[in-house]
């Protein structure tokens, strides 16, 4: 094999590469994955749900303890607002994790009925800009390297507002935000096809997000939420384009059958997740394309999921394991054989190379690596058998369980 580079993820030894997937993948856990959520029809509360941001951090730390990775937790502001952010970061550090992306929220206030950063009124835009700038400051206080912007901005009816004015407002608003980023922090702009607006969404797709980022600077990148596309869209191709442009910053990973369902990652279409990871591994191993390689190395793999009917911590542990397993399988693709098949126009052989890796059962290898590291071979089962869930539910009886608010 001609695998290049000293890094284990690109190493010639398959078990080295698997080890990398098991220990070094930058998986990030969202604080809101542990709270009571549901649909617009009903929220089914669960026992032991966190009551404040500190308990959410504890749950993320539990996932990290069982899996050995997932060492950052994303916050959502104001859901995770606290008086002392450095204190929250210290609380996380004592439990072996760090604060990850700071997610801004400009979609739950009366003022934002017609939008936030794109709103026709300068007064409302000012309020929204100030909020995202405050998120930059929270990033500074917590040592976070990412500020995330997802906007609910859009219109419900043709003619309701002017597309180009709104886009100009968006660019000007985000230029202010960009200037407020901590020195090495990045801003990621997440797109979504529709919802909550029904006619048009201001940042509706990767091209819309990328073009706005290009008006800001190198540290403005795109966040790809796997649930935010029209049916049938080739997400892995979007990933490839953004890697090549140096603009893929983060993923919000989840799965869906229909809309933005936030089901656990890999539960509906595990092959899609594999194909996405295959693009990332290809970029990580690309010695020619430095932009794609360094961009791929810095991507944050966040799980943006809602566990409405399933228990939350086990769902998160299972999801982390799925990411490890799928990344490990993508690392098994024989790139030399793949390129040879591509060069000779051998369609079936090229596809077989991917299928072979995808169908390899890497679970025994991952269990082996975990054992060597003193981790449970099956973190999911170990958690279920630990009695942790019952203890947590007893300890958190009383008080008000957190939700989306
Ligand atoms: C949005 C988007 C954001 C997430 C919120 C909760 O649909 O996916 O990333 O922060 O939901
Ligand atoms: Mn998302």
Image: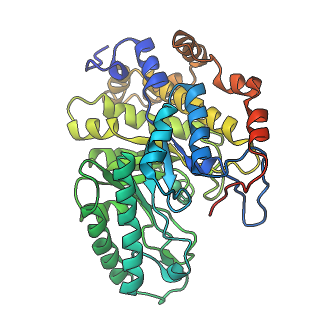
Q: Position of residue 51 (x, y in %)?
A: 67, 51
Q: Nearer the viewer, residue 207 or 64?
A: 64
Q: How many marks?
A: 0
Q: Residue at x 43, y 24 (%)?
A: 331
Q: Is residue 119 visible?
A: no
> Which image quarter has ligand 1?
bottom right
Quarter of the picture containing the N terminus is top left
Quarter of the picture containing the C terminus is bottom right
Q: Is residue 85 visible?
A: yes
387 left or right of 1? Answer: right
Q: Residue at x 62, y 45 (%)?
A: 55
Dividing the picture into quadrants, the one containing residue 375 is: top right
Q: Position of residue 170 (x, y in %)?
A: 34, 73
Q: Nearer the viewer, residue 120 or 236?
A: 120
29 left or right of 13? Answer: right
Q: Nearer the viewer, residue 17 or 371?
A: 371
Q: Position of residue 394 (x, y in %)?
A: 79, 39
Above or below residue 265? Residue 384 is above
Q: Position of residue 124 (x, y in %)?
A: 42, 82
Toward the bottom, the furthest residue is 159
Q: Nearer the viewer, residue 120 or 92?
A: 92
26 left or right of 363? Answer: left
Q: Residue at x 56, y 80 (%)?
A: 110
């Amino acid at each position: 094999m001609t695998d290049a580079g000293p890094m284990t993820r690109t190493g010639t030894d398959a078990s080295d590469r698997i080890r990398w997937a098991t220990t070094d993948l930058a998986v990030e856990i969202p604080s809101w994955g542990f709270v009571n959520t549901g649909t617009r029809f009903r929220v089914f509360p669960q026992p032991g749900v966190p009551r404040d941001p500190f308990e959410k951090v504890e749950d993320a730390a539990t996932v990290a303890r069982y899996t050995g990775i997932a060492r950052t937790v994303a916050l959502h502001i104001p859901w995770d607002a606290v008086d002392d952010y450095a204190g929250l970061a210290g609380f996380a550090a004592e439990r072996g994790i760090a604060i990850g992306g700071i997610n801004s929220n400009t979609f739950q206030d009366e003022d934002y009925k017609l939008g936030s950063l794109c709103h026709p009124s300068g007064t409302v835009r000012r309020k929204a800009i100030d909020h995202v700038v405050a998120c930059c400051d929270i990033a500074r206080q917590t040592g976070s390297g990412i500020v995330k912007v997802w906007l609910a901005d859009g219109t419900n009816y043709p003619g309701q507002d002017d597309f180009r004015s709104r886009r100009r407002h968006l660019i000007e608003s985000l230029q202010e935000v960009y200037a407020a980023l901590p020195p090495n922090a990045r801003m990621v702009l997440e797109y979504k096809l529709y919802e909550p607006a029904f006619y048009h969404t201001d940042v509706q797709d990767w091209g819309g997000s990328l073009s706005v980022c290009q008006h800001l600077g190198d540290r403005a990148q795109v966040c790809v939420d796997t649930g935010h596309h029209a049916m049938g869209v080739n997400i892995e191709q979007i990933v490839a384009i953004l890697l090549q442009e140096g603009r893929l910053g983060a993923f919000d990973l989840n799965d869906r059958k229909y809309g933005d369902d936030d089901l656990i990652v890999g539960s509906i279409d595990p092959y899609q997740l594999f194909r996405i990871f295959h693009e990332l591994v290809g970029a990580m191993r690309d010695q020619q394309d430095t932009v794609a390689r360094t961009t791929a190395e810095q991507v944050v793999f966040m799980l943006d999921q809602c566990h409405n009917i399933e228990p939350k911590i086990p769902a998160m542990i299972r999801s982390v394991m799925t990411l490890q397993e799928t990344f490990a399988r993508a690392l098994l693709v024989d790139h030399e054989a793949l390129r040879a098949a591509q060069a000779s126009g051998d369609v079936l052989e090229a596809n077989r190379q991917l299928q072979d890796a995808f169908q390899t059962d890497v679970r025994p290898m991952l269990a082996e690596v975990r054992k060597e590291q003193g981790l449970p071979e099956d973190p999911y089962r170990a958690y279920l058998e630990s009695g942790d869930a019952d203890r947590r539910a007893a300890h958190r009886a009383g008080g008000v369980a957190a939700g989306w608010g």
